[in-house]
Image (cartoon, coloured by chain):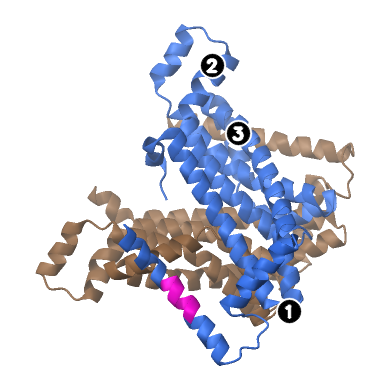
Amino acid sequence: MTGNSAKALALPLAVLLAFEVWARATHLQSDSLAPPSQIVMALIGAFADFSILAATRDTLFSAFTGLAIGTLIGLAFGIAFGISDTLNRLMEVTVEAIRPIPSIALLPIALIALGFGYRMEIVIVAFACVWPILILSRAAVRSIEPRLMEVARALRLPPAQRIWKIIIPAALPRIFVAFRLSAGIALIVAVTVEIAINPLGLGAGIMLAQQALRPDLMLAYLVWIGIIGYALNILLTVAQQRLFGRAALSGDSP
Amino acid sequence: MNRTALVWRLASFAVAASFIALWQLIANLKLVSPVFLPGPDRAWAALVRGFSAGDLWSKLAGTLEHMTYGWLAASIAGIAIGAIIGSSRTMRTYVAPSLEFLRPLPVSAIIPVAIAMLGLTQAMALFVIAFGAIWPIMLATIHGFAAVEPRLYEVARSLQMSRLAVIFKIALPSASPDILAGMRLSLTVALILSVVCEILAGLDGLGHWVLLSARAFRSADLFAGVILLGVTGYVTSVAMSLAENRLLAWQAAQR
């Protein structure tokens, strides 16, 4: 295993080293590239004056708030559609009409309705997160072992308890997969909104660095955004394995 | 059975229609300021006007063009690179982990870098769209190549097929479901990035149109643009599933 991870690291390290040597040898003067050592220095500098930390907080706050709202809405509809086939069929056209709207197309609407700031970003992130959760939780509820539902009926559980005690626990592993997907989407959408228009967070930070012709800082932001995306993914994958074991990964098709 | 499905479908359309009616009612009663929320009648009128008199066609064509070119470039490059990496065990151990590391990177973060390199140009948009759309395709191709039934490779070895022949005759066909699924994912990515690039770089397209409409508080035009983007997303994904069914028909028949 260590041999394999060494091999995995070989390429990025070689690329970084080659780039560093090339940049130094040619005395690189560029608006878009900077040698890795300068990128690292810029990243340290941005940490030292807390600017990147504040930006990270803003981005993650918007992304997670939007994710939470989107998850709640998606879960409510997903479970309702999963339980009631009638409701699902009646809402089909409506859902299929709204779902393909690219989340970022809502940006101008959110902009004139809510103005710049956290709120418009949260709304767009929430919209983007609703769909994967809705679709996957609906599928999860539908695939619950029918005998469990019979037990619930035999016990005469009221609907609220049926959802809380039977349906959610049974569907939870697959719902968590949906949540993991949505968390990635939330971060992507938040950063995209910030880059496109919202003067907030990491996306705005990287745009500012570009406009200030600071390629080292711009690439430092890029690296940092990559690290956050990677860390979030790892964190949720580990959480998934811890909480639900290997079984949860079986429904996890790429 | 078919009949009941049709009835359900009609009922479902009726529900959607009643939502539109509700939207009309809210707009008519001015529960939400008409500056933000035009009724469906005004959005529809803006759509018709945009197509008959305005330049909505050219905006739609612009967005479709960005999206298609970027997506096609990503598909070709993604399948080619994926095939090269996927068909060699050495490449898989050395290169694939770096790609997996890059995958969760929000691709839009590459936009400022692309702007710094290429300026606010069409080339920048194409680069960003292709860069964003390449990941699902490339990773799906690598995955598909790695998951090819090993016995097929053994057959190829005993037939002494060349590496190219193995790729085209064995690996690509058996990886095609994965590749097409990746291409479908990429289509959405390409549409989103087209809109973002148009907004940022002011390129001719629906993204630019909705932003301008929002800036001028022409909400009917804005909604018309958003509706059109939704239709674009829907039509392209339906076209992709049709193509997928068509291209994979031989596999369904085989199983």
Q: Looking at the image, is B28 positioned above or below residue A84?
A: below
Return the mark for residue A213.
1
> Crowdedness of circle 3 by 10 Å Cα count: few (<14), some, many (20+)?
many
Q: Earlier in the sequence, mark 3 or mark 1?
A: 3
Question: Which residue corresponds to the image point at 42% horizontal and 18% vertical from the top-left?
Answer: A148
Q: Looking at the image, is B15 positioned above or below residue B43?
A: above
Mark closer to the observer (3, 1): 1
Q: Identify the chain drawn in blue.
A: A
| SS of the residue under disc 3 | helix
> Crowdedness of circle 2 by 10 Å Cα count: few (<14), some, many (20+)?
some
Question: Which residue corresponds to the image point at 45% horizontal and 17% vertical from the top-left?
Answer: A149
> For this rendering, which residue is in front, B243 or B114?
B114
Picture coordinates of residue A71, whole percent (x, y): 62, 37
Q: Quadrant of residue B39?
A: top right
Return the mark for residue A162.
2
| Three-letter amino acid code at the position of disc 3 | Met
> For this rendering, which residue is in front, B187 or B18?
B187
| SS of the residue under disc 2 | helix
Q: Most prominent secondary structure in the magenta stretch?
A: helix
Q: How many numbered tags mark residues here?
A: 3
